[in-house]
Amino acid sequence: MNVLPEALRESTTVFQRGWLSSNNVLFAGKEGTAIVDTGYASHAPQTLALVRQKLGARRLDLIVNTHLH
């Protein structure tokens, strides 16, 4: 059973990454976009590519890092 409201499910993307990387959560709602946990600096090109692929021409409005890698 999925307990998230439909609007949140539709606006949330989880990028699951491999071992020794970082999972990222991207929110793209009506009010704006945000990514939670950008991951390792050495994986920045992959993170940017994933975000760009999902957002297209939309701008990323907010970055939230919950911890340091």
Image (tube, rainbow, N blue to C red):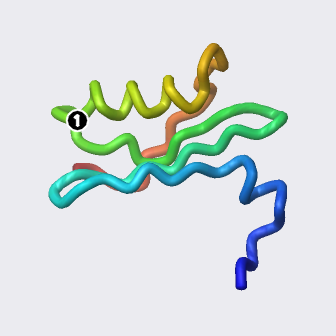
Q: x%, y% of residue 15?
A: 44, 49
Residue occupying image coordinates x 83% and y 62%: 6
Furthest residue to the top?
Answer: 57
Residue type of the residue flagged with mark 1: His
Residue 43: quadrant of the picture: top left
Depth check: give the residue in front, 54 or 35: 54
Location of residue 10 in the rendering, given as x and y in whole percent from the top left corner: 75, 51
Which residue is more in the foreground, 7 or 35? 7
Quick one: label 1, few (<14), some, or many (20+) residues within 10 Å?
A: few
State the residue in front, 35 or 12. Answer: 12
Q: Furthest-bottom residue in view?
A: 1
> Residue 3, image x and y in percent?
75, 78
Left or right of residue 26: residue 66 = left
Q: Secondary structure at mark 1?
A: helix
x, y (%) of residue 32? 74, 32
59 horizontally vs 49: left or right: right
For image coordinates 51% across by 36% down, the residue present is 63
Q: Which residue is mark 1?
A: 43
- Residue in the image at 51% along x and 50% along y: 25
Is 19 on the left-hand or right-hand side of 39? left
Residue at the image position 41 percent from the left and 48 percent from the top: 37
| Quadrant assignment for the N terminus | bottom right
Based on the displayed image, in which of its 4 quarters is residue 56 positioned?
top right
Task: Count how many numbered circles sit on residues in the image.
Answer: 1
